[in-house]
Amino acid sequence: MSARRIDRLRLVSLSLMVFAAIGSGCREDRTASSTAPAAVLSGNVTMDGSSTLFPVSRTMAEAFASANPGVKIAVTESGTGGGFRRLCAGEVDLIGASRPINGAEQELCRSHKIEFLELPVAFDAVTVVTNPKNTFVSCLTVVELKTIWSPAAENKVTRWNQVRASFPPQPLSLYGPGKDSGTFDYFTLAVNGTESSSRGDYTKSEDDTVLVNGVAADDNALGYFGASYYLSNANKLRLVAVDSGSGCVAPSAETVLDGKYQLLSRPLFVYAASMAAARPEVKAFVRYYLSPENSPKVQSVGYVPLPPAALLTVGRRLEKHVSGSAFGAHGSVLGLTPDVFQDDERIKNALVR
């Protein structure tokens, strides 16, 4: 065989080896691509706000962090009002809120050039409770609640028989949220007719655990807070039903969904700073929070999940990065039910009503 023939064969053989190597590399790349794990999340997420939503947020954060150990989530509670101040100052990524953002808070966010996403996540039933040793109160009318909690009652309505003549003349001790609480805003609007209008001579705290312990230790106590705090302490509290005109109704998932406890049931929200929501770890956590698959976690702490269709609608707001509030500057809003959040048009109609 001539030297030229041998060289030609060597060149063909070398070319085949090169193409084989390239093909093999391509196959390896395709295989690696198809089996590559999802990007590992890392970073820090900060969340503050409502003590009402705190048990849900803590549960969600613990479960998410367990599945994503590279993400550290710090959840604190300073009340809805305190949370909005921190969000609008750019101090936290997320807050929990037990009412919509109000006009003053929106202006504060604008002044700091902070845009936000408003994301309804669940419903709560504001729950009225007494000490278990109180055997004479099983139900109170809204009129009686107003007799107790109106500004005019301060230093005047101090005994139970002033609320209802058949009650004993025992001292009346009151426990409730402070002015930074969205529960305070909502309850005062529902009962007294004006948000933040209340007597001031009561034991107040933005920490609902403080209120629970106060009522549990005081035989003459009456208090109110989110349903989760009652359910986790039912052995040391006594539930009080509320009559808003159609008979005594106790708070429950059923009475929230069918509207029978509507006067004292309200939506709960997560608000996200828009810039924070663009970060992968923050967005992934909020997606997790909004997933219908995680609704049992909301139920486990005593709240009512939004219907799956509503959660999917809210999830689209997150994915499309829709900023601003659907509630204008209303702050607390009465008369909403979970199905309202299936689309923005229902929210608008509810606000008009």
Image (cartoon, grey):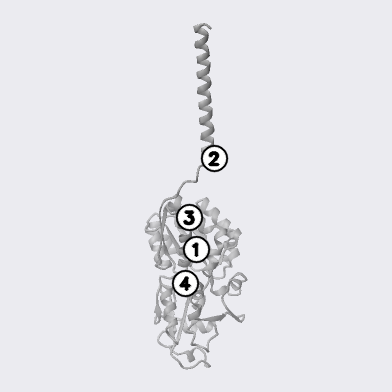
What kind of residue is marked 3?
Ala
| Residue tagged 4 | 183
The residues tagged by marks 2 and 4 sit, at their Cα atoms, a distance apart of 49 Å
Q: Position of residue 277 (x, y in %)?
A: 45, 53
Give the residue drawn at x 41%, y 76%: 210
What kind of residue is marked 4?
Thr
Depth check, mark 2 against mark 4: the one in front is 2
| Residue tagged 2 | 34
Q: Decide: few, some or many residues near mark 3? Use Cα within 10 Å; few <14, some 14-19, many ≥20.
A: few
Which mark sits nearer the N-terminus, 3 or 1?
A: 3
The residues tagged by marks 2 and 3 sit, at their Cα atoms, a distance apart of 22 Å
Asked which secondary structure carries label 3, the reply is helix
Asked which secondary structure carries label 2, the reply is helix
The residues tagged by marks 3 and 1 sit, at their Cα atoms, a distance apart of 23 Å
Q: Are marks 2 and 4 in contact (CB under 8 Å)?
A: no
Q: Decide: few, some or many residues near mark 2? Use Cα within 10 Å; few <14, some 14-19, many ≥20.
A: few
Q: For residue 67, which numbered disc appears in the image?
A: 3
Which mark sits nearer the N-terminus, 2 or 4?
A: 2
